Image (cartoon, grey):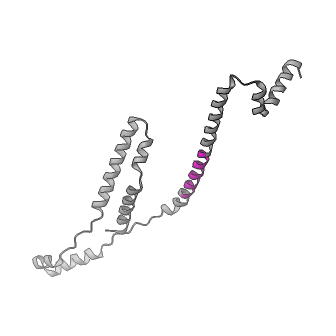
Amino acid sequence: MSGAVKKVTDVAFKASKTIDWDGMARLLVSDEARKEFATLRRAFDEVNTALQTKFSQEPEPVNWEYYRKGIGSRLVDMYKEAYDSVEIPKYVDTVTPQYKPKFDQLLVELKEAEQNSLKESERLEKEIVEVQDLKKRLSTMTADEYFEKHPELRKKFDDEIRNDYWGY
């Protein structure tokens, strides 16, 4: 097996082990998305299986002695020489080195965005609790109690009242 094919096969095998299919499936909400996801998983498994079986096998070696007996050594030696001279080029990956730094940077940005999102979610959850609490207490709360809790609104309210009532 050529080195490139073996490498692709190994990467595909490892990728199949690291994919959290069940975790991703739990994130899906619609039946259509679940069907598409199942189709994707089956296709991935089929390709992965093909890579594991088809490309992981070494070709059977040619039994040159068998052919020498039946055909003759001179002709078989010519074919053997031609067969041995065939070189299958090795795949040289020139794309991955270009995109690997970009991908790594995107992963860093993704982690930062995830952390920011978690912080924002936490802040919003606290705000929701405060609003729900305020909603419960609002019916019995006086304006002074409300402004005590939100002093930034007191000045704005006073300025608006002054403008509306006194005209300045």
Residue furthest to the front:
140
Q: Quadrant of residue 159?
A: top right
Identified at 52% across, 58% down, the residue is 99
Split into 4 quadrants, where in the image is the N terminus? bottom left
Confirm whether the magenta stretch covers residue 107. Answer: yes
Give the residue at the far bottom of this rendering: 74
Does residue 99 appear to the left or right of 145 in the view shown? Answer: left
Q: Is 130 situated above or below 10?
A: above
Query: How far from the left and from the top, in percent, is residue 38?
Result: 35, 43
Q: Nearer the viewer, residue 132 or 115?
A: 132
| 103 with respect to 145 (left or right) | left
Question: Which is the main secondary structure of the residues drawn in magenta?
Answer: helix
- The residue furthest left is 70
Instruction: Report if residue 81 lies within the magenta region.
Output: no
Magenta residues span 104-118
Q: Left or right of 74: which side holds 157?
A: right
